């Protein structure tokens, strides 16, 4: 038997217990892959979360994944990555928030857990493919031979924004079976196959903060209560009091409890001074940003300025930009039109149509 063929036909499926990853296993098995399901144990929230809220990574989710594997007649295993998750996802999340930035933990989880630790495990164990339930597509440039990441066919479910950190070394080993399907068709396929979780609801919030209260989570996790401080206007004059700067995000309007003749928004935070700055909506607009830790994915790093489209939030429409590459894996991006509430800590991702060119972490705005 050809060992290379055997490896290429073996697929490890990252299964969260949801319908998407279960459908990924279903589709790859139908394609003839020798499939094994794996559930990553990342976080148990029962002690940290308020009662009445349920996170993913629960025992129930793991049981659902195992039951689907039983239905599909494929092996299932679980791997505990909780320490790595606490360090690279939760730890970074807490650090970034406490330093005034707004991180995206899903990107960190994809980078260090799913396509870092789990992909390494898959290759070590002789799997040729790691598959997930992400809505995105991978192809190969017939001329350059470079692998490329593209948006999913279902643009409402497209997850390419949180996958920009993938590399040319990783893409040949990855499969996103759902990229060419609409979500409604995925649910229908799961129902027709009788999968136990075919109608299971999608998770909406960050997995380790199922109630969406970031500030309360930060206080529970760190054991430190956020100190009150001044809310200041653009001239630096105190106009009110805040309940802890970590509770406020750029662009926020509700919950400021300020009497003003016009709508005012959070436009900045100074964690060292423990102040939150507010101003009119016009002060939220910016045309320029600098991004760091920039990863060029579907194209090599350009030697000069390029035209592209970019988004600075998950489901935001792309806007035309000019990008200048900078030394040290950084880039300067200028939008044709001002953008609202561009936020340090979030990702900026570049596109050419449905092609993901690359992306990085927003450091500052102009």
Image (cartoon, rainbow, N blue to C red):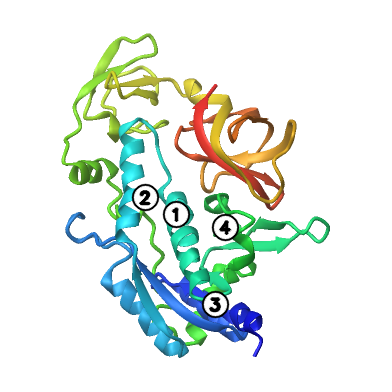
Q: Nearer the viewer, mark 4 or mark 2?
A: 2
Q: CA distance from mark 4 to mark 2?
A: 22 Å
Mark 1 / mark 4, whichever is N-terminal: 1
Residue 337 sits above or below residue 123 on the image: above
For disc 1, the marked residue is 112
Q: Which quarter of the picture shows residue 247? A: top left
Task: Tell me the quarter of the image containing the N terminus.
Answer: bottom right
Q: Nearer the viewer, residue 174 or 231?
A: 174
- The residue that appears at 37% across and 49% down in the rendered structure is 88
SS category of the residue bearing label 2:
helix
In this rendered view, identify the residue nearer to me: 248 or 148: 148
Residue bearing the label numbered 3: 11
Viewer-side label of 1, 2: 1
Numbered badge on residue 89: 2
Q: Nearer the viewer, mark 1 or mark 4?
A: 1
Which residue, given by chain and number where applicable, does mark 4 sit on? 158
Q: Residues within 10 Å of mark 1 (few under 14, many from 20)?
A: some
Q: Quadrant of residue 170?
A: bottom right
Q: Are marks 1 and 2 in contact (CB under 8 Å)?
A: yes
Q: Kindly identify the residue that appears in the image at 55 percent across and 33 percent down.
A: 291
Decide if residue 249 is in sight here. Answer: yes
Answer above or below: position of 291 versus 45. Answer: above
In this picture, is 36 found above or below 150? below
Look at the numbered discs 4 and 2 and tell me whether their residues touch, using CB distance below 8 Å.
no
Measured Cα–Cα span from mark 2 to mark 3? 26 Å
Secondary structure under the numbered disc 4 in the rendered image = loop
Tell me which numbered mark, 3 or 4, is placed earlier along the sequence: 3
Instruction: Depth check: give the residue in front, 357 or 20.
Output: 357
- C-alpha span from label 1 to label 4: 21 Å
Mark 3: give few (<14), some (14-19) or many (20+) Cα within 10 Å: many
Which of discs 3 and 4 lies nearer the camera? The answer is 3
């Amino acid at each position: 038997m050809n060992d290379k063929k055997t490896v290429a036909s073996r697929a490890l499926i990252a299964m969260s217990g949801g319908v998407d990853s279960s459908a990924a296993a279903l589709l790859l098995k139908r394609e003839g892959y020798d499939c094994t399901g794996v559930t990553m144990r990342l976080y148990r929230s029962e002690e940290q979360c308020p009662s009445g809220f349920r996170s993913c990574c629960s025992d129930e989710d793991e049981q659902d994944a195992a039951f689907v594997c039983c239905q599909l007649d494929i092996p299932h295993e679980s791997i505990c990555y909780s320490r790595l998750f606490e360090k690279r996802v939760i730890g970074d999340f807490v650090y970034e928030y406490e330093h005034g930035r707004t991180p995206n933990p899903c990107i960190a989880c994809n980078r260090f857990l799913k396509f870092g630790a789990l992909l390494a495990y898959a290759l070590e164990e002789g799997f040729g493919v790691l598959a997930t339930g992400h809505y995105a597509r991978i192809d190969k440039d017939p001329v350059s031979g470079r692998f490329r990441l593209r948006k999913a066919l279902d643009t409402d479910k497209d997850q390419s924004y949180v996958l920009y950190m993938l590399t040319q070394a990783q893409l040949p080993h990855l499969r996103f079976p759902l990229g060419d399907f609409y979500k409604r068709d995925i649910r229908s396929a799961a129902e027709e196959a009788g999968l136990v979780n075919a109608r299971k609801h999608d998770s909406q919030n960050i997995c380790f903060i199922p109630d969406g209260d970031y500030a309360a989570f930060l206080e529970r996790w760190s054991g430190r209560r956020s100190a009150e401080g001044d809310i200041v206007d653009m001239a630096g004059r105190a106009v009110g009091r805040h309940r802890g700067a970590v509770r406020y995000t750029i662009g926020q309007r509700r919950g400021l409890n300020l009497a003003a003749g016009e709508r005012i928004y959070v436009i900045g935070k100074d964690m060292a001074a423990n102040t939150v700055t507010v101003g009119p909506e016009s002060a939220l607009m910016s045309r320029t940003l600098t991004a760091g830790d920039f990863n060029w994915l579907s194209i090599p790093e350009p030697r000069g300025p390029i035209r592209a489209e970019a988004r600075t939030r998950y489901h935001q429409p792309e806007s035309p930009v000019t990008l200048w590459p900078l030394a040290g894996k950084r880039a300067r991006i200028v939008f044709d039109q001002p953008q609202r509430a561009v936020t340090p800590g979030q990702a900026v991702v570049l596109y050419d149509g449905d092609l993901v060119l690359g992306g990085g972490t927003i450091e500052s705005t102009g």
